[in-house]
């Protein structure tokens, strides 16, 4: 047990947790960031080898510090992102403690108690920023015991060299499914399966435009205006260069969703089959929120109702980085800065702190480095 209560405990040391830490430090609050990972980088350190951002580096930055470009790459790769996040937490001397896997957050009178096997922290407020990577979603079809081959989820995939020459079924019509299918198209006997025909965004659309669309939609909804349509109205798949190349070469021909697994592959309702050694389920994620279960806040589809980032049933709790329901594009590097600032400001107000840094508090260094591009 840490005896003295903190102002804030941030749970999660990925991009959302770091953005929250940046703004909490600016406001002079006393906080720690608890990270379940063994090293910096959040989910990016576990991504497949060829994964690249949808946006150039300058449009993929956290508040206060522009991501430097990656030599020879328009869209930086996952390893470059890990290096950037590592530098970010060191540059701003953010108080990370790892590895700490938080098991529960409970009410403790006027405080919240954050419990882990390695210790307990008491805080006046909590920011949950655990993301979704730790909770991969598999559909009921994946539980069929008949299939004797290998089943993977997006989180398990690393490199086409692991599957060279194998018969592979990739399931999923989003960005992960398209990128992994493109990764495997030249070296495996590939079957790409999607719930509906693939919808590629126009080739000139990348993360910059997607962030703008998400922001315009959220502003319209907040103001009670007609929904202009979000990112989903444009398409499902960003045509990053490897996906575009595979598509244009005719290597990304999607088949409709199959109806069941067989011992040796998959089968459709019309009786056709495809043999498979490996099935990769690119079927998405759910918010990793089990540590908040003791607070009794979950409602429809496992979500916790929020106003902005603040939990409606517990004003001392903020949720950050889980998707548009916790801030427009808040699950992206460029999008998380603004809701992180809003969460930190709201907590400072709740705790009766001035919105500016307290006397003697350290401001993050590098304030002028790209803050206009990322800090809203």
Image (spheres, rainbow, N blue to C red):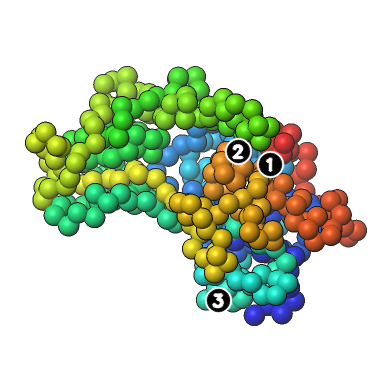
In what quadrant of the picture does the N terminus appear?
A: bottom right
Whether residue 63 sits left or right of residue 175 in the image: it is right
Q: Report the residue marked by disc 2.
A: 328
Mark 3 near mark 2, Cβ–Cβ under 8 Å? no
Mark 2 near mark 1, Cβ–Cβ under 8 Å? yes
Nearer mark to the viewer, of 3 and 2: 2
Crowding at mark 2 (Cα within 10 Å: few <14, some 14-19, many 20+): many
Q: Count all numbered tags in the image, as a single digit.
A: 3
Q: Report the residue marked by disc 3.
A: 118
Front-lying residue, 23 or 319 = 319
Residue 338 circle label: 1
Crowding at mark 3 (Cα within 10 Å: few <14, some 14-19, many 20+): few
Nearer mark to the viewer, of 1 and 3: 1
Q: CA gap, disc 3 to disc 2?
A: 34 Å
Helix, strand or loop at label 2? It is loop
Percent from the top left, x then y, of residue 90? 66, 55
Front-lying residue, 291 or 34 = 291
Residue at the location (51% across, 55% down)?
Answer: 299
Front-lying residue, 306 or 152 = 306
Vertical position of residue 256 compared to residue 83: above or below:
above
Identify the image quadrant of residue 257: top left
Percent from the top left, x then y, of residue 272? 10, 34
Q: CA gap, disc 1 to disc 3?
A: 32 Å
Percent from the top left, x then y, of residue 153? 32, 49
């Amino acid at each position: 047990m840490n005896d003295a209560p903190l102002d804030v405990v941030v749970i999660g040391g990925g991009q959302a947790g770091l953005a929250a830490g940046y703004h909490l430090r600016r406001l002079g609050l006393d906080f720690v960031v608890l990270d379940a990972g063994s090293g910096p980088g959040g989910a990016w350190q576990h991504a497949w080898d060829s994964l690249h951002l949808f946006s150039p580096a300058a449009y993929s930055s956290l508040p206060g510090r522009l991501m430097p470009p990656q030599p020879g790459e328009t869209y930086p790769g996952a390893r470059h992102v890990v290096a950037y996040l590592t530098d970010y937490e060191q540059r701003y001397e953010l108080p990370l403690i790892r590895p700490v896997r938080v098991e529960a957050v409970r009410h403790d009178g006027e405080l919240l108690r954050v419990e882990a096997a390695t210790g307990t922290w008491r805080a006046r407020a909590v920011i949950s920023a655990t993301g979704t990577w730790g909770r991969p979603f598999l559909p009921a079809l994946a539980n069929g015991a008949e299939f004797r081959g290998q089943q993977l989820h997006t989180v398990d995939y690393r490199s086409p060299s692991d599957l060279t020459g194998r018969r592979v079924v990739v399931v999923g019509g989003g960005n992960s499914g398209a990128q992994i299918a493109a990764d495997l198209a030249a070296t495996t006997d590939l079957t790409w399966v999607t719930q509906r025909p693939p919808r590629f965004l126009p080739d000139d659309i990348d993360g910059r435009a997607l962030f703008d669309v998400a922001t315009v939609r959220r502003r319209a909804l907040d103001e009670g205006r007609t929904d202009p349509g979000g990112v989903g109205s444009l398409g499902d798949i960003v045509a990053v260069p490897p996906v575009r190349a595979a598509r244009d070469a005719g290597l990304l021909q999607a088949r409709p969703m199959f109806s069941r697994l067989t011992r040796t592959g998959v089968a459709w309702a019309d009786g056709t089959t495809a043999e498979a050694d490996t099935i990769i389920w690119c079927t998405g994620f759910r918010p990793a929120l089990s540590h908040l279960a003791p607070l009794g806040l979950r409602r429809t589809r496992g979500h916790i109702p929020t106003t902005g980032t603040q939990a409606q049933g517990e004003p001392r709790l903020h949720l950050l980085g889980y998707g548009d329901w916790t801030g427009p594009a808040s699950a992206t590097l460029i999008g998380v800065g603004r809701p992180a600032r809003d969460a930190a400001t709201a907590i400072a107000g709740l705790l009766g702190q001035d919105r500016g840094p307290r006397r003697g508090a350290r401001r993050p260094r590098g304030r002028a480095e790209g803050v206009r591009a990322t800090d809203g």
